[in-house]
């Protein structure tokens, strides 16, 4: 089986979730290739090789400098036609979702999304997809090829294979309609520390914080732990914290090594986004909060007292 993985990048680095999908595809025993698209992206080939790609197709062109989906659909559609891949996989992101759906329409191919696992059975790709609010998992397949799959963020941990990849230049030819859109301006939110998608440690807050100002307590703890701050939909909707930090069914799915949930009840919508975390620590004054049913460690108490105490203990441990 031949699998192509779209490798989204940020600056000079491939994004963590893409490397996770690449490593997972390589573990299936398939012939795995990656594709990088943009301007000045040739330097990403070596990194892709370390995570399982044997070949990396490089579409390096000034016309691809802006992160617009349609030009990337053009590149992938042509590549799919020339190379006859059995499957094309994407790590979930806003850009990847646009590209995957556009490519499915262009190739008249099936697209399964929200995948949390992948396998090869009888020479065909099989995906695992949550259903019914993540209460059950179902296996999904594709009627024809190529099989397009959008993998949920945090589903696979990047694992280096120690290999190397051969770079293959891709000729860039764009459709006329793909050049009608121009990126006028691109704004990036600046913040200290890692993003919630990349962080190994997340300290998240919910309605139990009581007020927006108490996010400062979580920020202090996250800073000492070297982690990021997350939030539930309720506090994001209330304007207490930025949407980019929302964890849950309508936000982002994360899988850090440690997830500290402060003032979060544990509703199913939030659980969906963080249940893949390595260790879950819950802090809530309500002993009957649902989150205590699935966390690894629980603290029943006032978070305004508990969180500062945890921060002091972390500082003391680091100093010692």
Image (cartoon, rainbow, N blue to C red):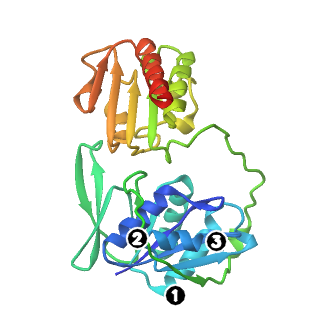
Of 80 and 197, the residue lying toward us: 197
Q: Quadrant of residue 292?
A: top left
Q: Is residue 87 above or below residue 294?
A: below
| Disc 2 crowd, CA 10 A, few/some/many (<14, 14-19, 20+) | some
Please give the name of the residue rendered at 62% of the width and 66% of the height, measured from the top-left corner: 70
Q: Nearer the viewer, mark 3 or mark 1?
A: 3
First reached walking from the N terminus: tag 2 or tag 3: 3
Say what secondary structure mark 1 lies in. helix
| Disc 3 crowd, CA 10 A, few/some/many (<14, 14-19, 20+) | few
Residue picked out by circle 3: 43
First reached walking from the N terminus: tag 3 or tag 1: 3
94 to the left or right of 149: right
Disc 3 to disc 1, C-alpha distance = 24 Å
Say what secondary structure mark 3 lies in. helix
Residue 243 location (% of width, % of height): 56, 35
Residue picked out by circle 2: 161
* Residue 292 shows in the view: yes
Q: Nearer the viewer, mark 2 or mark 3?
A: 2
């Amino acid at each position: 089986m031949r699998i192509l993985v779209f490798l989204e990048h940020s600056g000079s680095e491939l994004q963590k979730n893409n490397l996770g999908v690449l490593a997972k595809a390589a573990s299936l025993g398939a012939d795995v290739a990656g594709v990088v698209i943009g301007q000045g992206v040739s330097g990403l080939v070596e990194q892709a090789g370390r995570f399982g790609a044997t070949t990396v197709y490089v579409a390096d062109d000034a016309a691809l400098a802006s992160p617009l989906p349609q030009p990337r659909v053009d590149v992938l559609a042509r590549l799919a036609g020339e190379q006859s891949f059995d499957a094309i996989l994407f790590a979930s992101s806003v850009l990847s979702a646009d590209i995957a759906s556009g490519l499915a329409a262009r190739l008249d191919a099936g697209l399964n999304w929200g995948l949390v696992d992948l396998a090869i059975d009888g020479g065909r790709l099989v995906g695992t997809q949550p259903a019914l609010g993540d209460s059950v998992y179902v296996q999904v397949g594709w009627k024809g090829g190529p099989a397009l799959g959008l993998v949920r963020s945090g589903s696979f941990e990047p694992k280096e294979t120690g290999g190397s990849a051969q770079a293959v230049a891709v000729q860039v030819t764009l459709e006329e309609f793909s050049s009608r859109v121009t990126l006028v301006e691109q704004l990036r939110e600046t913040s200290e520390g890692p993003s919630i998608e990349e962080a190994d440690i997340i300290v998240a807050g919910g309605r139990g914080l009581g007020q927006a100002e108490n996010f400062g307590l979580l920020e202090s703890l996250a800073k000492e732990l070297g982690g990021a701050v997350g939030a539930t939909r309720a506090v994001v909707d209330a304007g207490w914290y930025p949407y980019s930090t929302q964890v849950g069914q309508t936000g982002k799915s994360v899988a850090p090594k440690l997830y500290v949930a402060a003032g979060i009840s544990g509703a199913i919508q939030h659980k969906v986004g963080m249940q893949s975390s390595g260790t879950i620590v819950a802090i809530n004054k309500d002993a009957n909060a649902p989150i205590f049913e699935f966390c690894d460690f629980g603290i029943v108490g006032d978070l305004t007292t508990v969180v500062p105490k945890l921060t002091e203990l972390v500082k003391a441990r680091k100093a010692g």
